[in-house]
Image: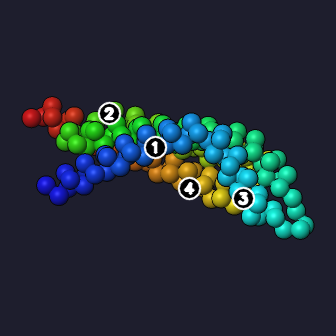
Amino acid sequence: MMENRLNIAVKRLLDITFFAGIAVWAAMPVLLKYLLGLYGRIAWSRPDSDSAAAAAAYYPVLISIMPAGLLALLILRELRKMMATVLAGDCFVEANVKSLKNMGTFAFIISAVLIVRIFFFFTLTALTVAAVFLFAGLFSKVLAAVFEKAVAYKLENDLTI
């Protein structure tokens, strides 16, 4: 019973995160201008720099954040699909293998987008997030292979019975 409540809570959290993510992604062009302006007032308010650097960062950051954000939303969509199978009590299905493979691919693309961005506008955060998504992609691909074997064993067992 406790496990099912936890699964329901995780599903709800994924739903909230997914829909909030859509809103943030849609508002990102405006939010980014505000955030870079705020950051510029803080970081570039020193006498040896100017807020023009914040304005110059807008397009490189926006061009990398928008596709990366969209791919992150696609990862959340795949996770929501997988949680639906967990709640249904049948998580070792081919659809989850496909979702894990998709999530791995999406994570690799996010990593690549951020690595390209680093060449135009370096931040330690972008490098860290690129590394996290690279490892998440690897983990997802390995987990897809494990799930693929589990699905095959399950189907074999179902045919035996």
- Location of residue 98 with respect to 136 vertically, above or below: above
Q: Residue 132 carries which label?
A: 4
Q: Name the residue under label 2.
A: 94
What is the CA distance from the residue labelled 3 to the residue labelled 1? 23 Å
Q: Name the residue under label 3.
A: 39
Query: In the shown orientation, is residue 64 left or right of residue 132?
Result: right
Task: Please rate how many residues cluster around mark 3, counting C-alpha atoms within 10 Å: few if below 14, some from 14 to 19, many from 20.
Answer: some
The residue sitting at 72% across, 58% down in the picture is 39
Q: Evaluate if marks 1 and 2 touch, with contact meaning CB atoms under 8 Å apart.
A: no
Q: Quadrant of the C terminus?
A: top left
The residue sitting at 62% across, 52% down in the picture is 130
Q: Which of marks 3 and 2 is nearer the N terminus?
A: 3
Amino acid type at circle 4 is Val
Q: Earlier in the sequence, mark 4 or mark 1?
A: 1
Amino acid type at circle 3 is Tyr
Extreme residue in the bottom direction: 47
Q: Nearer the viewer, residue 92 or 3?
A: 3
Q: Which of marks 4 and 3 is nearer the N terminus?
A: 3
Q: Say what secondary structure mark 2 lies in.
A: helix
Q: Evaluate if marks 4 and 3 touch, with contact meaning CB atoms under 8 Å apart.
A: no
What is the CA distance from the residue labelled 1 to the residue labelled 2? 29 Å
Q: Quadrant of the N terminus?
A: bottom left
Q: Mark 4 against mark 1, which lies toward the viewer?
A: 1
Task: Please rate how many residues cluster around mark 2, counting C-alpha atoms within 10 Å: few if below 14, some from 14 to 19, many from 20.
Answer: some
Amino acid type at circle 1 is Ala
| Residue 29 can be seen in this image | yes
Task: Please rate how many residues cluster around mark 1, counting C-alpha atoms within 10 Å: few if below 14, some from 14 to 19, many from 20.
Answer: few
Residue 36 position, x and y percent, is: 72, 52
The residue sitting at 19% across, 51% down in the picture is 4
Q: Mark 1 points at which residue?
A: 20
